[in-house]
Amino acid sequence: METRTEAPPQQQRPSGGGDRPAPPEPPTETPARRRRPPLAVIIIGALVVIAGLIFGIRYLAYATSHQTTDDARVDADTVTVTSKIQERVAQILVDTNQPVRKGQIIVRLDDTDEQAALQQAKAALDAQRASARAAQENVALTRATVAAQTTQGQGGIAAANSSIQNAQAQTQSAQEQAQAANAAIAQAQAQLRVAQSQVPAARAALNRANADLARYAALVRTGDIASQQLDAQRAAQAQAQSQYQSALDNVAAAQTAVTQAQARYTSAIAAATAANAGIGAQQGQLTTAQGRLSESDNPFRVSSSQAQADAAVAQAGSLQAQVKTAQDRVAYTVIRSPIDGTVGEKNVEIGTSVQAGQSLMTLVPSTGVYITANYKETQLGNIKVGQDVDVEVDAYKGTTFHGKVTAIAPASQNTFSLVPAQNATGNFVKVTQRIPVRIVVDNAPPDKPLRVGMSVVTSIEVKK
């Protein structure tokens, strides 16, 4: 049964004062009773709500415990194969997308010039080694010559020293003889003075004997005395005459002794002077012998010869380095793969003349791929190295890979760009930066390989 309720009558306002009359209120109607939905619809609705709640709670729980980004891709440390020398390509042994092994020959360059340079370097090295051996033998010869000349010089010095000692001994003997001759001169002069002092007395005695003889002779002639006394006086006069003559002879002998002593002294002085001059001559010979010894025993002769030998050896070492360089250049004509991987791009053809450092091909490693996920700086607060990561690859829908965070970049992407951002004061627009995070996937299935450049979505579990 439906009931109706009538609305109260609308009051009319007075018309004065310019007021508009109030609009009539619409009539109210009693709503009709709604029908109840079927029980199945209610149950289905309830299940949908419960399922929505379950998935919503799980989504919220996952979203609050994970940081997710779709700015991520598969990366790898690709290797660019280059040439170390300028040469012409003679042979290419691989092609694009071909797997290669580490150490496998992938390109050969023409090695004609390099082989010729190697042979030339080896010939120069052999010649220099022969020169070095000759220089070493010259060092040994110089040492032997110096040793022989040193021995000879030492013998000369010893002989000169012996001669000097002999001359010094002769000088000493001559000086002693001169001193003895000088003493003999003094003694002879003393004897001369004694003899000269006896002459006046002998002369006076002779004069007295002569006077006595004359007086006695006169007395004998007068007969005052006997002739025997005159004979005695004559004997006395003869004795006085003999004594006077003996005194004169003694003076002459003393003068002769003085003259002889002076001659001996002069001879001794001359001998001492000659011996002293001999000392000077022998000292000159000693100086000459010492000079010869210094010349022969000069260490710079051996060191100079040794320096020449060392220079020859060093030059041989330099040529050995040139041989090694030539060998390396020959080895550089054979280019090998540095890694196990796949040829991703080939930039060279047979007959092309390549430059040193020119890229020949790019190799993608077969292992060691990783994911670079560029997270916003606002997401990095709880991201740490070692956290678990869920990875979804666009190429493999429905497959979730698992990995771990291995590194977080020290700077944002713009920091390493060619034109980094310059945010001047007063003209600054804040832009959320992205920081690269490296993720390594654990054991990707062989049938679902991760290829470089694939787009992925990463979710890092920041809360357990």
Image (cartoon, rainbow, N blue to C red):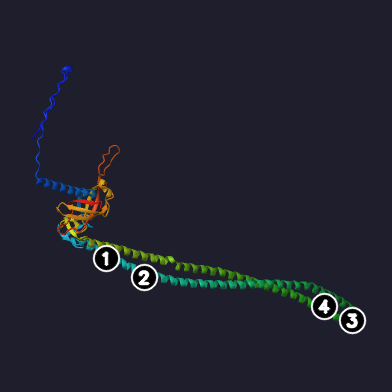
Q: Say which of marks 4 and 3 sits in front.
A: 4
Foreground residue among 150 and 68: 68
Q: Nearer the viewer, mark 1 or mark 2?
A: 1
Furthest-bottom residue in this view: 228
Percent from the top left, x then y, of residue 261?
67, 73
Which is more toward the observer, 103 or 156? 103
Q: What is the secondary structure assignment of the residue under circle 1?
A: helix
Q: Which is more N-terminal, label 3 or label 4?
A: 3
Tag 1 and tag 4, C-beta contact below 8 Å: no
**Secondary structure of the residue carrying numbered label 2:** helix
Residue found 33% across the figure and 63% down from its top: 315
Q: Residues within 10 Å of mark 4 (few under 14, many from 20)?
A: many
- Give the residue at x 39% y 66%: 306
Q: Secondary structure at mark 3?
A: loop
Q: CA distance from mark 1 to mark 4?
A: 126 Å
Q: CA distance from mark 4 to mark 3?
A: 17 Å
Dot 1 or dot 2: first in sequence order is 1
Task: Give me the C-alpha separation between circle 2 and circle 3.
Answer: 121 Å
Residue shown at the point (87%, 82%) measured from the top left = 228
Q: Amino acid at mark 2?
A: Glu
**Quarter of image, res 444:** bottom left
Q: From the image, tell me which residue sits under label 1.
A: 122
Residue 3: percent from the left, percent from the top?
Answer: 10, 32
Instruction: From the image, tell me which residue sits under label 4.
Output: 237
Q: Is residue 67 above or below residue 104?
A: above
First reached walking from the N terminus: tag 1 or tag 4: 1
